Image: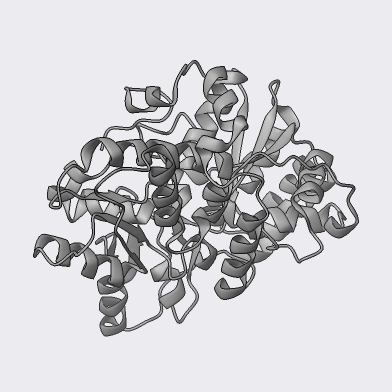
Amino acid sequence: MTFEELYNRLLKSSVSGNFEEELDLVKQQGYDPHHLSCLLGPEKHPVVIRTDACTCEKTKLEQCRARCYFDALFIEDGAIAIDPKLCVGCGECIRGCDAKKLTESRDILPALNALRNADAPVYAMIAPAFINQYSEAVTPGKLRAAFKKIGFAGMVEVALFADILTLKEALEFDKNIQTEKDYQLTSCCCPMWIAMIKKVYAQLIPHVPAAVSPMVACGRSIKKIHPNAVTVFIGPCVAKKAEAREADIADSTDFVLTFQEIQDVFDYAGINLAEMEEDDRDHSSRAGRIYAGTGGVSEAVRATVARIHPGKPITVKTRHADGVPACKQMLNDILEGKGDANFFEGMGCVGGCVGGPKALIPRDEGRKNVVRYGAEASYDTPIDNPYVIALLHQLGLDTIESLLEKSDIFVRKL
């Protein structure tokens, strides 16, 4: 039985309600204990897992090892192994494995178990890249209704918290960028970009606002408003699985699923997303919605700075890069004094989050969808969005300037 066969067999039984019986049958038949352990206890394994023995020659293994930008791969007993402390989940090794022996961690079985047995509400936190991932006929309202049908208490668009982080980064820019030599690095939403700065370009950390990602802000906010709630992030990114495990922010997100994992659940549950009734709630502004595409964060912060401080003599001059090689080049240029900007945005995936390894549609199509969804927003910037202001008040922040103060929700230690 292959890893994928075991995954589908157990997932189908979990959705249909006979998981324990199916698990007993699996244990009586031939199965790989490592596969079962990865599926039942993903937190015990790296976010990239090897599903079978490597059969490549040593030269090929060395090429695989060298492919990792974060030195998380090493060769052990003639096979590729993954160091969970170094792996950030960029997925480059998965895409480059010709033998298809590497795959991403799957959190879906423990998440469904929590959905069945949790005494507290379970919330789905959907990434800004979700627009039309499940076809053009699937609106945000239909997707929200589908999540509720399978047992979630609700679906929260993480774009609303991208709004809040946009506001925070705009305030940071307005406060800290006072001369032509000053500059700021973002994006807090991309764990690969933040990991690259922390692990390879640590000398640039003083230029990074100490902000959590929208995923973390969303999870922490839900747990503050609904103590003991279970939070499940769904997106196109494998690196988010690694981010959710980081010690200083692990309190925010209980499970991270990909778009494909939740699509598998809908399929086995017999849910036709396009036929769901609308459960629509329009809370995020254009700024938060466009986070998912390359340059989206830069544009969101630029517009918000202009809204906060229209007469600021130093305007936001942006430069952005997507894909790890391009991000490295941009960071090297900054160190060499050739940055030629004061606001730098990095995204680990080409095209931004819509180009993530687990996106269900082509990145160009995903980017167009995100831009369109942003244009449909009722508000242009978060400072104009009454839902942002109301949420900040609910979280105990009386003014938007409170975002510059130390917060147990929106700040992390880099």
Q: Residue 251, percent across and down?
A: 46, 28
List the single residue furthest toward the front.
311
In screen coordinates, is 18 left or right of 377? right
Quarter of the image for the N terminus: give it: bottom right
Q: Quadrant of residue 30?
A: bottom right
Give the camera-side residue of 347 and 228.
347
Query: 56 or 110, which is in the foreground?
Result: 110
Image: 157 above or below 227: below
Q: Is residue 83 visible?
A: no
Quadrant location of residue 274? bottom right
- What is the residue that sits farthest to the left in this orientation? 336
Q: Observer-nearest residue: 106 or 37?
A: 106
Could you tell me which residue is drawn at 79 percent across and 36 percent down? 151
- Residue drawn at (64%, 67%), measured in percent from left and top? 360
Image height check: is 86 above or below 248? below
Coordinates of residue 316 in the picture (x, y in percent): 31, 53
Q: Which quadrant would the C terminus be assigned to in this image? A: top left
Q: Taking the image as drawn, is residue 214 in sight?
A: yes
What residue sits 64% from the left and 71% below the top? 361
Picture quadrant of residue 114? top right
How far across and how far down the image is residue 230, in percent? 62, 29
Left or right of 7 in this view: 380: left
Residue 115 percent across, percent down from the top left? 71, 34
Left or right? Give the position of 389 relative to 132.
left
Instruction: Tell me how the rendering is colored.
Output: one colour
